[in-house]
Image (spheres, rainbow, N blue to C red):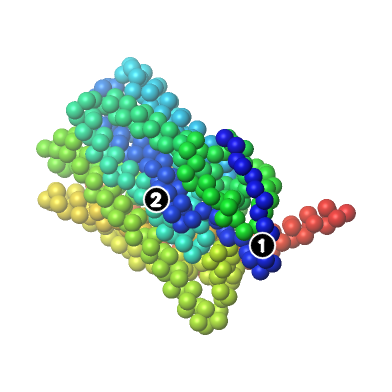
Amino acid sequence: MSLKTEETPAPPADVEEPYSIFTPTEKWVIVSLIAFGGLFSPLSANIYFPAIPALAAAFHKPIELINLTVTLNMLFQGLSPMFWGTISDTHGRRHAFILCLLLLSLSCVGLALTPTSDYWLLLLLRCFQAAGSASTVAISVGVVGDISTRADRGSYLGLSSIGPMVGPAIGPVLGGVLADKLGWRAIFWFLCIASAVCMIVMILFLPETLRAIVGNGSIPLPSIYYPVVPIIGRDAKRRATTTPVPAAKRKFQNPLLLLLHVDIVLLLLINGIVYSVFYGVTASISTVFHDAYPQLNETELGLCFLTVGGGMLAGSLFCGKLLDWDYRRLRRTLQAQDTVAQVDETSGKVNDAFPIERARLRLLPAFLALFVVSCIGYGWCIDKRTSIAGPLIFLVGVGLVVITIMNPMQTLMLDLMPTQGSAITACNNLVRCGLGAGLVSGIQPLLDALGPGYAYLLLGGLSALMGPLLYLVVYIGPRCRTRRIRIAEMQKEGGARATGS
């Protein structure tokens, strides 16, 4: 598809190019598309849980070995975004997104056809499935960083997370119904068809947003970067206020280098511990409910997951608005005190003295306390075999609060590394999925040894230890940012001198 070029008059000297040329409506459409794609990362993992007992029976393996497929899936959820996220930060979001969905769809075909005598093949293909599905979330965060500024990033990130939050809500229900009515193979046929449909939607409508390629959206590109049906950004060139200059191609940046920053490592650790505890709760729902309430069938077990997934969905809907509201409130307070300069909402430029760590994290200690209480309450309800309403209510709390903890930290990491959105999310996946995989592999022995009450008391206490680290990030974060800025300026000056010489 060719793009017609037209002369754009030079703007007055005082006119500054906007951060993104896309209109607010176009931005919401883009974020809605990536939210659809991000649905498949948790969906492919959570749809599997209610079928674990059926798979154990079909493959003639104990629950611990079937749980190993969950552990390996999580490990590759952590590892694969390190590759795909970096590719999308360097070569573009659109192609990486489409290739991930293609890999997911093909791996699901293999899983649906796996013979029950080949347990090793089930393990292998679950790894490929994770490699395709997990990276969609990392790429989605990169897209949000491409088109949004700090002032509105929370809302866009909140919408983009709706897809990943819907997955835990509907995945186990679909998995339970499909496994109960059509058999466990139907789960993978469903994922194959759904991911293929999503891939087609991306091919048709998703534009390229990587700033290293399209700038703020106004740089003309080869036709391969354009959607088949270019309804988004088709007037971007006309809306540009300056003649677009193609951006320099970015070199490969090792995402593991982000682990050299102390504030980033602390955020990854906090997020990873909370996520692993959350995953330990959700991955064991089918087994603990099956033991505590043996009258439940697979469909009813799947319906139990609606509570935690519904809580996450509700949390994602208001968390982004809460983040942006609290950001603006703190900014107004500091501006009234002449502590920080005004923020340019058009270009997205912000005073580096603004305490972004404080703006994003100051509500989290209260949310963390609620998360701890919900985990402990859930465990003791299961332990004492209370009415099923008791643990289900606490599961709503677990889902609601966990997203209000993870989303602000993800938003803050994107604020700190806006040009490496996918890479920082890949590091986040690596840490949290690695910790989660370890916890999932040990959750059943822990439950057997301590019982649900003390097991989740222990996990809740582990989460509570993350509270002091939140205050530490707020304290050292500005110093870390200042050091990064100073190093970047020194490198720029050194490069300029080398060019001049």
Going by the numbered disc 1, the residue's amino acid type is Pro
Going by the numbered disc 2, the residue's amino acid type is Ser
The percent coordinates of residue 293 (x first, y second) are: 14, 41
Q: Is residue 132 left or right of residue 184?
A: right
Residue matched to label 2: 161
Q: Residue at x 31, y 30 (%)?
A: 190
Asked whether the beta carbons under mark 2 and mark 1 sit within 8 Å of each other, the answer is no
Snapshot quadrant of residue 2: top right
Give the class, few, some or many, for how many residues have Cα within 10 Å of label 2's Cα (few <14, many ≥20): many
Q: Is residue 409 left or right of residue 288?
A: right
Q: Residue at x 29, y 22 (%)?
A: 59
Q: Relative to residue 471, is residue 120 depicted above or below? A: above
Q: Residue 11, labelled with which disc?
A: 1
The percent coordinates of residue 110 (x first, y second) are: 39, 22
Residue sitting nearer the eye, 236 or 258? 236
The percent coordinates of residue 270 (x first, y second) are: 44, 56
Q: Residue at x 27, y 32 (%)?
A: 52
Name the secondary structure under disc 2: loop
